[in-house]
Amino acid sequence: MAGAGLSGCAAPTPAGGGPFSATDLARAAALRDAALRSPLAWELLQSLVTEVGPRAAGSPGDAKAVAWAQSRMRQLGLAQVRAEPVPLTTWQRGATTAVLTAPSRHELVVTALGNSIGGRELDAELAYYPDFAALRADTTERARGRIVFIDQRTERTRDGSGYSRAVLARFAGAVEAARRGAVAVAIRSLGTDQDRIAHTGAMRYDPQVAAIPAVAVSVPDADLVAQFQASGAPLRMQLRLEATGTVTATSHNVIGEIPGSDLAHEVVLISGHLDTWDISPGAQDNGAGCAISMAAAKVLLDAGHRPSRTVRVVLFANEENGFDGARAYADRYKEVVHQLVGESDFGADRVWRLRSRVAPEALPTVAAIGEVLRPLGIAAEGNDGSPGPDAAMLMRLRKWPAIELTQDGTRYFDVHHTVADTLDKINPATLPQNIAAWAAVAWLAAQSTQRLGPLT
Amino acid sequence: MAGAGLSGCAAPTPAGGGPFSATDLARAAALRDAALRSPLAWELLQSLVTEVGPRAAGSPGDAKAVAWAQSRMRQLGLAQVRAEPVPLTTWQRGATTAVLTAPSRHELVVTALGNSIGGRELDAELAYYPDFAALRADTTERARGRIVFIDQRTERTRDGSGYSRAVLARFAGAVEAARRGAVAVAIRSLGTDQDRIAHTGAMRYDPQVAAIPAVAVSVPDADLVAQFQASGAPLRMQLRLEATGTVTATSHNVIGEIPGSDLAHEVVLISGHLDTWDISPGAQDNGAGCAISMAAAKVLLDAGHRPSRTVRVVLFANEENGFDGARAYADRYKEVVHQLVGESDFGADRVWRLRSRVAPEALPTVAAIGEVLRPLGIAAEGNDGSPGPDAAMLMRLRKWPAIELTQDGTRYFDVHHTVADTLDKINPATLPQNIAAWAAVAWLAAQSTQRLGPLT
């Protein structure tokens, strides 16, 4: 049913030996320009965030989101719409409180880090470290019996590199602290804001090292701790977590397609992830990416040209806490040729850069794609791209080639993984440029006479 | 002890018949310029916010703040430092939760309004009003049995007029809703932010009208309600409040002075309020005003000239929830001539305007004061001033003349009455200009040969 109305002809032969025919390039430019007039990503995003809201993998909100996504994909006219089961274990945040009790009493704004153990009430001195490197460099007994505080700052950057430099403090802070005998770890939220809101996010334990509770405090609360630390006064904290984990549940990858013609068995994958952290409405992370990918597919459908390869929209399950959706997908489709995988998962601001991870012989193809994106203000910058997290997982596991369309992440970490990732943080005016970029990339990847992978 | 080192001479006779001698004007300019180099307000503010933190009137934090203020005033060298008892009744916020249950389920970020009753669990449809005027204009039965939602927006303005236009929705919303049979009232937070943080603040009941619970939801949550309302779907909300009130307690006005010489029995009062809302660290509201007033007095002390009139710094108790401190002060000092009352209570950004409330014959004196403030970028703008809230109460109750030094309030309502009123919201660079303005005003008011009041 879906795909009806698409003309069935395969890609015309390229002229002049390039990877694309003049017709396909003209169609790519037309798709791109049509997408710039599309309000669809905003409409889908608004619907998802307001009608569904928070949707942690395995939660009732997640089930609602899975139903929402299938229903919307069918309405848009995508084919083969389905929800593919993804087994996972859930984690429940529970109440989390932290009170600084010395040198003076302050109730802190705090949240548990994802996967933290709970069931503990602690009251201990703080061992302060200005950053994660300082903790790792510590060979003393200073942390023993204490709550380690990691005051790692997250620098505001356009490309997210500030977050990348900071993220190990969250992910591995508990393990490094426990190795040194700490009873818990508390970190400065990985946020570029000054809101009194704590940022959650995934952390992991090492089976060889004691599991200790892990929390993030809001940035202003970390400032308070830092100020007391500078004064030289000993700090003490009470910490209580009710987190529980390891309940088995099922989520789903939601998939819809535009069937290809002559190369229908090869897949061009564009994606987002449907899940959020339990506390987050997930407008930026990652309602926007889901909406952009769905809207890009609709632009292709509306253009009326059947692609040579199959264009597949995937909304992954549980990106936030374990990549279970990406892993299940990689397992299920391991035999299928993927011409390209891509994911929009860095908010909703404009795309400014194209980077690839393709086989060297495909670089001229990427350059030709870059030419089509150039009028969108997107610059092509090499083959060391870092695609969205699920796409990166697929790339690693399956050597599928990948594309990165880098969004402007300057504001992204202001509300990342918080209750404040709400619809008002989205600029509706920047969404169409994202649709345009993904639609043009998907179309050209589907039409290219050049295979983009596999990677070696 | 305090005041030692001040030269004991009274004000020289004015030259040319104006209210100020050339010496006093020169000293005012010198005070002003010395204050611009003072880091003291920042140091005091940092100390108060970090060492004491939230300090709701009658709470343990308040008692700590009262001790802090007396200790600091003595350290600064003020005389007659004392804490004068202020009886009051406290109110306990307790846990407050709100869940939108239709058209889809969303946990809202919410807080009780100050003085709201609690002990209720409600589950009712919403009756939506775009603003308070719409509620007041409603003569139908639409609100009966429902939770009234007032979507009153707070416009960002430099002078706070946006807040003034909105504040009745908070203060009187419950009464107007209850008059129409509503079971509770929920308002859009009176905030200019888009943070997911609810703004509290005082509300009142009318003994003639049923008391119903009153809450504020965060701005993004109000956006969500508005969006559902626009879609035409019926809205439902569950509301639970544990607020309790009417516990008798004692707070204190904290007072310190620079004793006057020939007119020592007349008082020039500069002030802030020491209390905060229970949830707020109170950096802007009103740690800044306390710090600025104390620092201004220190600049006067450091200059070494004993003022003609007594300069009194007052840190009022319980401005936030009933003006008990101002009322107690007005009662205790009703027989004392007050040459001027003023209060810094609009954050920590620059003063841009001087307005007065003085007797008409004193207008040339105010104009002369304005000339001294002009180099600070402060413009004199008439005699219809609106001094800080405690000062305004004194002016109303006692007809004491008053001065308004209007701060730039553009950012003020981003964090007003929230957990986010933290130290990082303060720009240390704007504080010295505030000290300079208050020091110059206090000095000139103390020296003037012209009485500024009483008002008629």
Image (cartoon, coloured by chain):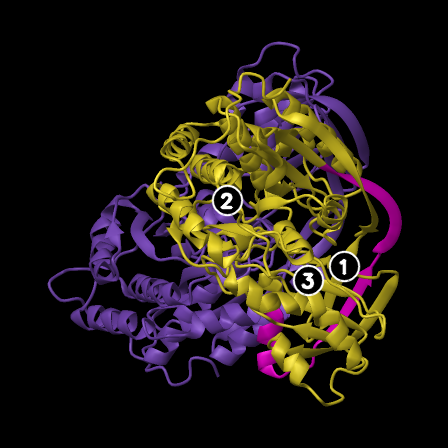
Chain colours: A yellow, B purple
Dot 1: chain letter: A
Residue A404 picture location, percent across and down? 51, 51
Residue at left offset 47%, top offset 75%: B78
- Tags 3 and 1 in contact by the CB under 8 Å rule? no
Whether residue A209 appears in magenta in the rendering, the answer is no
Q: Residues within 10 Å of mark 1 (few under 14, many from 20)?
A: some
The residue at which mark 3 appears reads as A216
Let me know if residue B217 appears in the view: no
- Segment colored magenta: A224-253
The residue at which mark 1 appears reads as A97
Residue at left offset 43%, top offset 60%: B269
Q: Earlier in the sequence, mark 3 or mark 1?
A: 1
Residue A380 picture location, percent across and down? 40, 53
Q: Closer to the camera, A410 or A198? A: A410
What's the mark number on residue B193? Answer: 2
Whether residue A228 appears in magenta in the rendering, the answer is yes
What whole-number distance in Å separates the C-alpha atoms at marks 2 and 1? 25 Å
**Residue A364 horizontal side relative to residue B190, left or right:** left
Q: Which quadrant does the C terminus of chain A fall into?
A: bottom right
What whole-number distance in Å separates the C-alpha atoms at marks 3 and 2? 23 Å
Dot 2: chain letter: B
**As shown in the figure, which amino acid type bears the numbered disc 2?**
Asp
Vertically, is A52 above or below B367?
above
Q: Secondary structure at mark 1?
A: strand
